[in-house]
Image (spheres, helix red, strand yellow):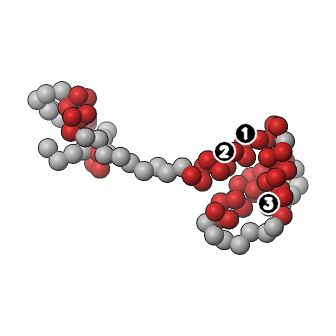
Amino acid sequence: MIVAPEPTFNHLIGAVRRDHEGEQVEEIWSEVYKWYDSKKEWKMKTSRILKGLQYSNAVEKVDSETIRDLYGRPLSFSVSRMNSIPSVLLPTL
């Protein structure tokens, strides 16, 4: 698994994810992470691993006033326009 920088980094991403999910991960991956994090050319990539674990793709509801601002008054909808908006974002009007 530890052969060259690029493929090893890809394996590191998987190890960090598994560790984050509570799985048992070999101790060496902690040292591998520290090595990459200590290298200037890899530092930004290692920080992205941790940011990626914290990212949530949660959808937030859009309030009625915002919908009215976007689509005008009176509200008029077309099928094609409605299909472009996820249903969880549409308020009950």
In this image, 84 relative to 79: left or right? Answer: right
**Quarter where residue 71 is shown:** top left
Give the percent coordinates (x, y) of residue 66. Answer: 25, 33
Residue 66 in view of the camera: yes
What is the total number of numbered labels drawn onto the structure image? Answer: 3
Q: Residue furthest left?
A: 74
Q: Write down the residue under mark 2.
A: 48
Q: Residue at x 71, y 55 (%)?
A: 13
Of the 4 image quadrants, the one containing the N terminus is: bottom right
Distance between the alpha carbons at the discs numbered 1 and 3: 17 Å
Q: Residue furthest bottom?
A: 24
Q: Write down the residue under mark 1.
A: 44
Is disc 2 placed on a helix, strand or loop? helix
Is disc 3 placed on a helix, strand or loop? helix
The disc labelled 1 sits on which kind of residue? Answer: Met
**Tag 3 or tag 2, which sits nearer the N-term?**
3
The disc labelled 2 sits on which kind of residue? Answer: Arg
Give the percent coordinates (x, y) of residue 23. Answer: 66, 71
Q: Are marks 1 and 2 in contact (CB under 8 Å)?
A: yes
Distance between the alpha carbons at the discs numbered 2 and 3: 16 Å
**Quarter where residue 85 is shown:** top left
The disc labelled 3 sits on which kind of residue? Answer: Ser
Q: Residue at x 21, y 39 (%)?
A: 64
Distance between the alpha carbons at the discs numbered 1 and 2: 6 Å
Residue 78 in view of the camera: no
Give the percent coordinates (x, y) of residue 7. Answer: 80, 51
Q: Write down the residue under mark 3.
A: 30
- Give the crowd class for mark 2: few <14, some 14-19, many >=20 residues within 10 Å: few
**Tag 3 or tag 1, which sits nearer the N-term?**
3
Is disc 1 placed on a helix, strand or loop? helix
